[in-house]
Amino acid sequence: MRILIDMDNVISDFERGFLEMWREKYPHNIWIPIGKRQTFYPTDQYPPKLKEFVEGIYLEKGFHRSLKPVDGSMEALSEMVALGQDIFLCTSPLTRNKYCIVEKYEWVEHYLGKKWIKKIIVTKDKTLIHADILVDDKPEITGVKEPHWEHVIFDQPYNRYVENKKRINWKTWKKILSIDSNIS
Amino acid sequence: MRILIDMDNVISDFERGFLEMWREKYPHNIWIPIGKRQTFYPTDQYPPKLKEFVEGIYLEKGFHRSLKPVDGSMEALSEMVALGQDIFLCTSPLTRNKYCIVEKYEWVEHYLGKKWIKKIIVTKDKTLIHADILVDDKPEITGVKEPHWEHVIFDQPYNRYVENKKRINWKTWKKILSIDSNIS
């Protein structure tokens, strides 16, 4: 199978990185624990008056490079490859932070190695990419065409309301995607 | 139609930019006029002993941002959009020059405007992208799958030996691709 893996909040821990930097930078402001996050974009849940400060965190140079891998994600990617799956990393850039793209390439090289750089696809429209599965935490993914892939939700607190799609995390993926060594 | 447009030597004038910088930087070295270039990669035609210097030109920070548009390309893109075609810019990054990606985004923003940033797809494997046509100067384009698109050659001296594909430049594209206002 060809599987597209989204980056932010699927393999790179954007939510944790954001919260840590937010609390460090604004220790006297309110903060929302990760488990209580209810919107895809943090700016939609934090008070409107804080919007520019919230955005300021992830528009900052270095933010994307500083993110830690999501627990279990690096092992899962290696295992997918070992099981013969064809994996690509498929990410949409923040158009307001051009450096985030370079940082994502640096991040991938650092955590996964040079070989994986060739596996990165940067696109605002993921429906154009031909694959069997897209693993993504975003509740709805639209674009110029009907996608060929099946959207499998990567479980995050803010997407729990989505009920009509398969849902995985890095402990359950193999069972839910029916990927095992017999298939490879 | 959905049309993917490659960037280097299709809309951004890599060959001209390279040659100008080469002659400026190494005025006493040999140089190959654009019309006599016979290989896709300059390093395959320049003497092997000059390879690192040749590569040094386009691995340099700022090189990609400094390129000029290919004559007629900007007008052609605007016209394609005006004629109702769905255009995406589809580029493979130089994996050894990470900055080239950011510079390509900056280049697109500068010459085409912010809206076009959303139309950029960065991928090493273009066969994964679903479209009707890919306009690309590279003689052969392969990847993990059979592409959905038809490869239309963008005419350059070094790809003239390719005979089994449609060939366009920014004067002939409308006729050869049969794109006119009746279709849109």
Image (tube, coloured by chain):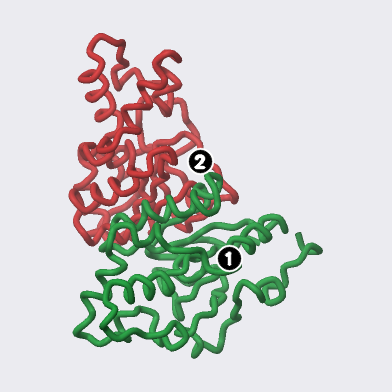
Chain colours: A green, B red
Number of other residues with Cα within 10 Å of mark 1, as a class: few under 14, some 14 to 19, many 20 or more: some
Picture coordinates of residue B64 (x, y %)? 28, 39
- Which of the numbered marks, if any, corresponds to residue A73? 1
Q: Quadrant of residue A4?
A: bottom right
Specify the quadrant that holds the N terminus of chain B: bottom left
Where residue A10 appears, x then y in whole percent?
51, 69
Instruction: Identify which residue is drawn at 50% across, 36% down.
Output: B140
The quarter of the image holding the C terminus of chain B is bottom left
Q: Secondary structure at mark 1?
A: helix
Q: Which residue carries the number 2 mark? A: B141
Q: Position of residue A14 (x, y in %)?
A: 42, 70
Where is B32 relative to B155, above or below? above
| Frontmost residue, A35 versus A139 | A35
Q: Note whether B146 is above or below A92 in the view shown.
A: above
Q: CA distance from mark 1 to mark 2?
A: 32 Å
Name the amino acid type tagged 1. Answer: Ser
Q: Is residue B174 visible?
A: no
Q: Judge the density around disc 2: few (<14), some (14-19), many (≥20) Cα neighbours within 10 Å.
A: few
